[in-house]
Image (tube, rainbow, N blue to C red):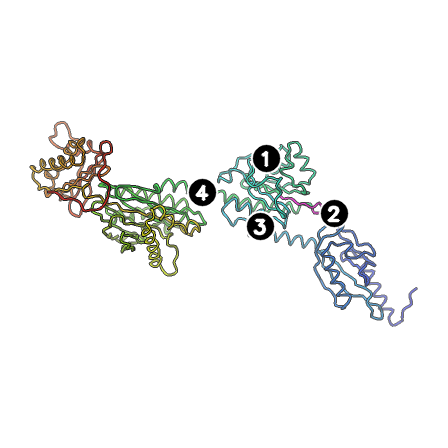
């Protein structure tokens, strides 16, 4: 029997009732400790944890450093009397198997009737479930934020592994189907055998074991097991070490697939649209925390999100590959050599997005050894931009073959872009457009005529060191319509460089496009002064875009002009008199013989005779005749008439109409073009055994009479 003062009997009874009530329930754990923090009484129970034995200390039931930390906090309570309220304690138990836990702890100091400390009473609430749920929620947020940031399947696979280690597993490998890496859909498989997988990402807390499959290794053939079929059907499967070892012991895969310290394995397929794009393999190396169904559900959720990202990256890879192939086939050769110019082109795709865009360059050889240089930039990126670029490039080549001047060529091209916009979906019409610059160089006159449709100006670097943007008045971008394009004509000295480029080369300058163009001109001047080759100069000019791709793609066309020597050109002018036909034949025969082309002199005389006769009969005079000798022989006859010649087949009773037919049969090709007044009819002949004229150089054309 316990005797207490009458005035404190009620208080003592209330304390005893409270203590019995606390010790009788199980939702709140009560641990009473003495001044040495040894357990003197407890009702503590928790799933997976043994109650602390009487007399045990914190170090007996908790692993360091958590035991040391909470012991220091309890001693502070014992010393100061200040309660510890709702304090989160997390750690691992010493029980077997060990268990991670999270408790909410409240501690108060107990005293005797004289106020002397007798120990600490600790109230414990198990918050492990809430803590684990919070960890899983945080992991889901990390997965949603980090997986899918890239359109590269390899980078996405590595992001998956980095998200899962160490918060979910100790070792993670991501294997992808070979077809996925190429942008294609993987084959549908069922059962064991070769799954056509390749290891593309690994992550481990302490380095990836060398005995396991390494990056780039092919996944081995698997036996036909129920677990394999479950994976192929899109289900997540769990294994312990014993079950996975039994499944792989017969084919010797244990060393490749099972880490030495691996205890629990969770595998989830990257399953999208009924296809297995790959597998996620996650290992835990501790036997006290195996994967459970909640872990399997979370891994399945992450794998589903990752599979969509992988599939998006795969489809982007396919589109990008198709766009690259399309654009490579649409663009001309990087290096072009004609009698008039030597040209080198560079194209660099943009960074991010679909990358491939609508920038293009072109070098178009024209009759009379002239050449058209073209650079354009279609609005947008991706397949549609590359396809539009192909249509515009084809149109430019066709219009250039009609020998239209650059300003008229752009006017026709503007009408085409307007039609393309009209054919597009109404919501996308504003995105159909392009800029373009066309330069026409004549190696005989050494004149270059340039017209621009909203494009940056070309840059000329001359042999004397002068480098400047050409003063071209740009017209509106293609597709705007209603406004004219103006042509600018300049004389280019021999060995001058002409640079045509898209706006991706000058980037987004804070001080304006003019300053950016001037900086580019200074760089070109330095390269020209140092006598760099065109290839080396173009690579240096685009080096920054190659190392750090910009938001827009880049096209550069760098050309060195090569005027013809004076002794490769002969010109005459004759009156509109039938007698001049014989004079023209005689003049041509002499010049052809001088050039060593006696094998084709009769053919040349016959062509000249027919063309001069037509000019005298139908156009009037004066009649101009010019021969150009290089890798081909060009015969040109000019007259004041604007009537274009027409090839027709004469009947057996016709007295005329066979002249142009003979010209077409005797020459490689023929055609006509308008001049400022009148027209020029030309015919090209191949040289026997490739007899070439003098090498291109400088000097005016010789005029004979």
Residue under pointer 2: 97
Disc 3 to disc 1, how far (Cα)? Answer: 28 Å
Magenta span: predominant SS is loop
Residue 287 covered by magenta stretch: yes
Residue at 23 percent across and 47 percent down: it is 405
- Circles 3 and 1, Cβ within 8 Å, touching? The answer is no
Residue under pointer 4: 319
* First in residue order: circle 3 vs circle 1: 3
Residue 118 image position (x, y, % from top left)? 82, 65
In the displayed structure, 121 sits above or below 601; it is below
Residue under pointer 1: 220
In this rendering, which labeled residue sits more in front, label 4 or label 1?
1
Instruction: Left or right? Give the position of 337 relative to 110.
Output: left
- Looking at the rendered structure, the secondary structure element under dot 2 is loop
Residue 76 covered by magenta stretch: no
Residue placed furthest toward the bottom:
7
User: 110 or 570, which lies in front?
Assistant: 570
Disc 3 to disc 2, how far (Cα)? Answer: 30 Å
* First in residue order: circle 4 vs circle 3: 3
Residue placed furthest toward the front:
530
- Looking at the rendered structure, the secondary structure element under dot 4 is helix
In this rendering, which labeled residue sits more in front, label 3 or label 1?
1
Residue 231 image position (x, y, % from top left)? 61, 38
- Looking at the rendered structure, the secondary structure element under dot 3 is helix
In this rendering, which labeled residue sits more in front, label 2 or label 4?
2
Residue under pointer 3: 143
* First in residue order: circle 4 vs circle 1: 1
Magenta range is 282-289
- Circles 4 and 3, Cβ within 8 Å, touching? The answer is no
Residue 521 image position (x, y, % from top left)? 33, 55
């Amino acid at each position: 029997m316990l005797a207490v003062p009458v005035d404190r009997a009620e208080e003592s009874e209330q304390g005893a009732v409270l203590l019995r009530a606390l010790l009788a329930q199980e939702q709140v754990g009560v641990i009473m400790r003495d001044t040495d923090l040894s357990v003197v009484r407890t009702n503590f129970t928790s799933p997976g944890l043994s109650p602390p034995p009487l007399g045990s200390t914190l170090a007996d039931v908790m692993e360091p450093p958590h035991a040391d930390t909470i012991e220091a906090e309890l001693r502070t309570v014992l010393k100061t009397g200040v309660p510890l309220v709702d304090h989160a304690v997390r750690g691992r138990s010493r029980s077997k198997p060990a268990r991670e836990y999270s408790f909410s702890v409240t501690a108060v100091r107990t005293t005797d009737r004289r106020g002397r400390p007798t120990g600490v009473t600790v109230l414990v609430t198990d918050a492990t479930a809430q803590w684990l749920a919070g960890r899983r929620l945080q992991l889901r947020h990390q997965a949603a934020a980090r997986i899918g940031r890239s359109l590269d399947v390899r980078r996405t696979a590595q992001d998956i592994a980095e998200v899962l280690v160490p918060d979910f597993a100790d070792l993670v490998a991501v294997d992808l189907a070979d077809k996925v890496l190429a942008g294609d859909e993987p084959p549908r498989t069922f059962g064991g055998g070769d799954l056509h997988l390749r290891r593309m990402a690994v992550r481990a807390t302490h380095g990836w074991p060398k005995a396991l499959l390494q990056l780039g290794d092919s996944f081995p053939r698997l036996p036909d097991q129920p677990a394999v079929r479950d994976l192929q059907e899109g289900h997540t499967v769990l294994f312990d070490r014993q079950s996975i070892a039994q499944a792989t012991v017969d084919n010797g895969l244990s060393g490749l697939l099972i880490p030495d310290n691996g205890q629990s394995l969770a595998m989830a397929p990257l399953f999208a649209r009924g296809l297995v794009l790959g597998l996620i393999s996650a290992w835990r190396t501790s036997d006290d925390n195996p994967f459970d169904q909640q872990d399997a559900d979370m891994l399945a959720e992450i794998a589903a999100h990752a599979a969509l990202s992988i599939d998006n990256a795969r489809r982007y890879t396919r589109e990008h590959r198709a766009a690259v192939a399309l654009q490579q086939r649409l663009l001309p050769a990087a290096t072009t050599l004609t009698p008039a110019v030597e040209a080198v082109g560079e194209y660099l795709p943009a960074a991010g997005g679909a990358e491939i865009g609508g920038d293009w360059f072109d070098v178009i050889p024209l009759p009379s050894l002239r050449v058209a240089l073209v650079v354009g930039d279609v609005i947008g990126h991706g397949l549609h931009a590359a396809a539009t670029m192909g249509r515009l490039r084809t149109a430019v080549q066709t219009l250039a073959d009609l020998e239209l001047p650059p300003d008229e060529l752009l006017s026709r091209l503007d009408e085409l872009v307007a039609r393309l916009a009209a054919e597009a979906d109404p919501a996308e019409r504003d995105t159909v457009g392009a800029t373009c610059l066309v330069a026409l160089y004549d190696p005989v006159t050494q004149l270059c005529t340039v017209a621009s449709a909203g494009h940056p100006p070309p840059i000329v670097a001359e042999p004397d060191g002068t480098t400047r943007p050409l003063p071209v008045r740009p017209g509106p971008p293609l597709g705007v319509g209603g406004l004219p394009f103006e042509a600018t004509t300049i004389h280019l000295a021999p060995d001058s460089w002409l640079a045509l480029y898209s706006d991706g080369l000058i980037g987004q300058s804070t001080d304006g496009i003019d300053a950016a163009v001037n900086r580019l001109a200074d760089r070109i001047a330095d390269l020209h002064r140092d006598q760099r080759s065109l290839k080396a100069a173009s690579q240096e000019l685009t080096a920054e875009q190659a190392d750090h791709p910009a938001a827009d793609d880049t096209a550069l066309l760098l050309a060195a002009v090569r005027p013809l020597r004076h002794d490769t050109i002969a010109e005459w002018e004759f009156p509109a008199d039938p007698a001049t036909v014989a004079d023209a034949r005689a003049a041509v025969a002499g010049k052809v013989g001088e050039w060593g082309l006696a094998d084709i002199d009769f053919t040349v005389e016959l062509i000249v005779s027919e063309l001069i006769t037509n000019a005298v009969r139908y156009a009037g005079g004066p009649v101009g005749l010019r021969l150009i000798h290089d890798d081909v022989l060009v015969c040109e006859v000019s007259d004041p008439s604007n009537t274009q010649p027409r090839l027709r087949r004469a009947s057996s009773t016709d007295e005329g109409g066979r002249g142009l037919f003979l010209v077409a049969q005797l020459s490689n090709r023929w055609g006509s073009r308008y001049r400022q007044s009148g027209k020029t009819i030309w015919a090209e002949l191949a040289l026997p055994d490739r007899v070439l004229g003098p090498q291109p150089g400088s000097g005016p054309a010789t005029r004979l009479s």
